[in-house]
Image (tube, rainbow, N blue to C red):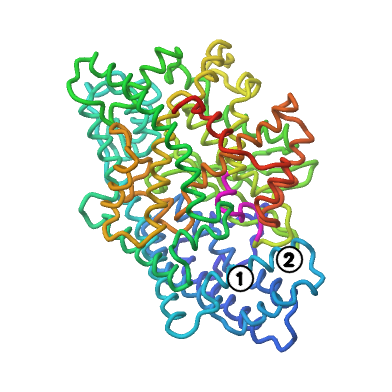
């Protein structure tokens, strides 16, 4: 029978033929994709004609077309709707894909052609975009070990293969741990829980044939920690949440993390770098570990001061409830929610009815229309899961992209929220319309209501989606979010600001039952509380980023957990706050190389996003068309076609200082 992954996709917008796909189709499709890619790359390397940009770089761009198509579908499904078969194939593919990558970058004939082009780059008559693509290809090959020979080259291949296996193992261990733990709630345990949380807990339990349960999904456990007055249950749930990957079982990630760090250090050494952090940060905006540490420490001190002051207030509230002993991490959210209600008259349970999922999706789309003239039309097409939905994205009648939203938590989906492209935009070889996916893990209920943080996450991921959808480059290698890691979060964090625009909430934040707008005084209180509890949020983030940096800027620690403890002690970590992501479930850092030595990048981008939104504020119009056009031209459509700093300077005219970040978090006056 014909494999649907390898046949032409005569579906609307050439979407993957999800209805006819079976798990058994993927392995043979990968085999064909790898064979086709190897043949195409061999033809490039052995081409008797003199190297040219067209017969080498452009040929490389198209060499893996089948493999890219198959991988784009598989890896999206493996993260969003995993099965036993998909998890097994991921483990099988990890060393195979790593070996293939090493084959390509170790191909001396291929790299020789690239070196020839690189040496003659100023005489080739390249466009600015082509020159940038050549630069990035050459950089990728060199940083992948193309200049190594013999035993060193062989060892680097082994190291990268093992790292690929370990990253998959780390990620699957977390997923298994998250599937395995839940806490059933007896009738007396429901005390104090708002209706939206009860609905979500019942829905999660129904999936397992049980009554209401709490799982380690953030959209369930955080509101439980906020509202449950039963301290022992809060402690039980919290400790299970932070212990993911560290339970002394077959899915314990502590040894996996230690081996990953050892191999990363060896990889950097083989490539001639002082540390893995030096290697990883070289192509980023930050450039050096010292620059990262400087930013983080400038934020850490005022954040810790604010958090300690807040902790003292929460400890008094704990004591007033007759609880002996210090404020603990499982107490913070409960008493912080009480304090927020008292000081800002802001109750999340009262706020949520105005933040329905459908209304917030409409708000995302409306802002994109007002800024970039994008229109969104629902599509009735087959997708990979009943919860997933699709829209045609167009402008002036022309299709720009297909957008897929998959918003609800389920046991087959890894935790967190992310954006990916099943197919990236490019023009080489014919115009390719991207397929862009947003994945979230909101609690499913009836109705589907969001917290304000959930709504912010929705806007954040949609900002990434805009970066993919508005991409307008010739080469897929630099398309969309293919930019420096500490620049990639700028569009997503910038888009969050439009959720705070009063007219957006006035229009879209309407009661899910009555349709009434959020009361004006509630809206004012919500916006006034925008920097509430930022000491906590900043401390838990910066602590994680500093631990990540410490893991990678020196020799690999023999015991990462001991190193984590030493870093936190030296920082003076507040007792009642823990890292946002403890090492055994720090997927950003250990499930792959993406954010290793790079978790700081959210904060690096935040320095820019506060300043970038100020460009709109300075016009007096948050939807100013000229500023929006500059944002699209120099940031959202440009991909990696120019260095990140150069693009930002074109948009804004200057680089911002850390003060914009501190002001945005309400920490300028903390010391």
**Res 386 visible:** no
- Farthest residue toward the left? 324
Residue that badge 2 annotates:
131
Depth order, front residue of 492/309:
309
Which residue does the image show at 73% across and 42% down from the upper left?
653
Label 1 or label 2, whichever lies nearer to me, is: 2
Membership of 490 in magenta stretch: no
Residue carrying label 1: 64
Percent x, y of residue 557: 31, 59
Instruction: Residue 125: give x, y in percent of width and height.
Output: 82, 70
Q: What stretch is highlighted in magenta?
A: 478-489
Give me the disc on residue 353: none
Is residue 77 visible in this depiction of the protein?
Answer: yes
* Residue 433 percent location from the top left of the image: 69, 54
User: How many dots with numbers?
Assistant: 2
Q: Which of 268 and 79 is in front in this view?
A: 268
> Does residue 529 appear left or right of residue 611 in this picture?
left
Which residue is found at the position 23% from the left and 17% from the top? 319
Identify the residue at image location x=55%, y=64%.
Answer: 70
Q: Residue, x 79% and y 43% (percent of image)?
A: 397
Q: How crowded is mark 2: few (under 14 residues within 10 Å), some or many (20 or more)?
A: some
Secondary structure beneath dot 1 equals: loop
The correct choice, above or below, for 636 with respect to 17 in the image is: above
Label 2 element class: helix
- Name the one closer to the observer, 203 or 80: 80
Quadrant assignment for the C terminus: top left
């Amino acid at each position: 029978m014909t494999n649907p992954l390898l046949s032409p996709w005569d579906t609307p917008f050439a979407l993957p033929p999800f209805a006819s796909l079976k798990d058994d189709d993927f392995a043979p499709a990968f085999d064909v994709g790898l064979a086709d890619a190897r043949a195409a790359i061999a033809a490039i390397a052995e081409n008797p004609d003199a190297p040219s940009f067209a017969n080498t770089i452009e040929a490389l761009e198209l060499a893996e077309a089948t493999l890219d198509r198959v991988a784009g579908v598989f890896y999206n499904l493996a993260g969003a709707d995993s099965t036993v078969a998909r998890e097994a194939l991921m483990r099988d593919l990890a060393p195979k894909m790593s070996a293939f990558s090493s084959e390509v970058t170790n191909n001396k004939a291929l790299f020789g052609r690239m070196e020839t082009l690189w040496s003659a780059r100023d005489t080739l008559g390249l466009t600015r975009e082509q020159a940038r693509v050549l630069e990035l290809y050459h950089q990728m090959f060199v940083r992948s070990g193309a200049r190594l020979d013999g035993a060193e080259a062989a060892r680097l291949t082994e190291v990268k293969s093992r790292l690929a296996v370990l990253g998959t193992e780390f990620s699957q261990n977390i997923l298994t741990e998250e599937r395995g733990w839940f806490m059933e709630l007896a009738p007396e345990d429901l005390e104090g829980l708002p209706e939206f949380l009860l609905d979500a807990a019942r829905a999660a339990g129904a999936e397992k044939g049980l009554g209401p349960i709490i799982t380690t999904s953030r959209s369930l456990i955080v509101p439980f920690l906020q509202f449950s007055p039963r301290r022992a249950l809060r402690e039980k749930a919290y400790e299970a949440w932070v212990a993911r990957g560290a339970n002394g079982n077959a899915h314990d990630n502590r040894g996996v993390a230690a081996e990953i760090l050892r191999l990363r250090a060896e990889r950097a050494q083989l490539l001639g770098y002082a540390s893995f952090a030096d290697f990883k940060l070289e192509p980023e905006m930050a450039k050096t570990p010292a620059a990262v540490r400087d930013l983080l420490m400038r934020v850490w001190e005022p954040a810790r001061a604010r958090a300690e002051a807040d902790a003292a207030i929460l400890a008094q509230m704990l004591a007033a409830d007759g609880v002996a002993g210090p404020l603990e991490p499982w107490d913070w959210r409960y008493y912080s929610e009480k304090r927020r209600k008292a000081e800002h008259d802001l109750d999340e349970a009262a706020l949520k009815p105005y933040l329905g999922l459908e209304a917030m999706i409409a708000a995302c789309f409306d802002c994109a229309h007002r800024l970039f003239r994008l229109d969104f039309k629902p599509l009735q097409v087959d997708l990979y899961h009943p919860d997933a939905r699709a829209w045609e994205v167009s402008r002036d009648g022309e299709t720009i992209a297909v957008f897929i939203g998959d918003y609800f938590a389920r046991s087959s989906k890894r935790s967190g929220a992310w954006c990916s492209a099943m197919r990236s935009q490019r023009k080489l070889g014919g115009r390719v319309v991207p397929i862009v996916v947003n994945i979230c893990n909101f609690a499913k209920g009836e109705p589907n209501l969001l917290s304000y943080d959930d709504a912010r996450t929705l806007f954040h991921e949609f900002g990434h989606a805009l970066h993919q959808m508005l991409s307008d480059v010739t080469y897929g290698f630099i398309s969309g979010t293919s930019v420096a890691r500490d620049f990639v979060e700028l569009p997503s964090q910038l888009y969050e600001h439009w959720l705070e625009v009063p007219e957006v909430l006035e229009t879209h934040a309407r009661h899910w039952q009555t349709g009434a707008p959020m009361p004006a005084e509630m809206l004012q209180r919500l916006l006034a509380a925008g920097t509430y509890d930022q000491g906590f949020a900043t401390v838990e983030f910066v602590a994680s980023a500093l631990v990540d940096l410490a893991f990678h800027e020196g020799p690999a620690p023999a015991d990462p957990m001991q190193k984590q403890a030493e870093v936190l002690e030296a920082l003076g970590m507040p007792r009642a706050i823990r890292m946002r992501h403890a090492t055994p479930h720090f997927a950003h850092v250990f499930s792959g190389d993406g954010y290793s030595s790079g978790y700081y990048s959210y904060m690096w981008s935040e320095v820019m996003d506060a300043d970038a939104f100020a460009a709109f504020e300075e016009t007096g119009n948050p939807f100013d068309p000229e500023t929006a056009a500059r944002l699209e031209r120099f940031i959202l459509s440009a991909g990696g076609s120019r260095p990140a700093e150069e693009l930002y300077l074109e948009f804004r005219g200057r680089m911002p200082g850390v003060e914009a970040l501190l002001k945005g978090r309400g920490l300028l006056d903390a010391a």
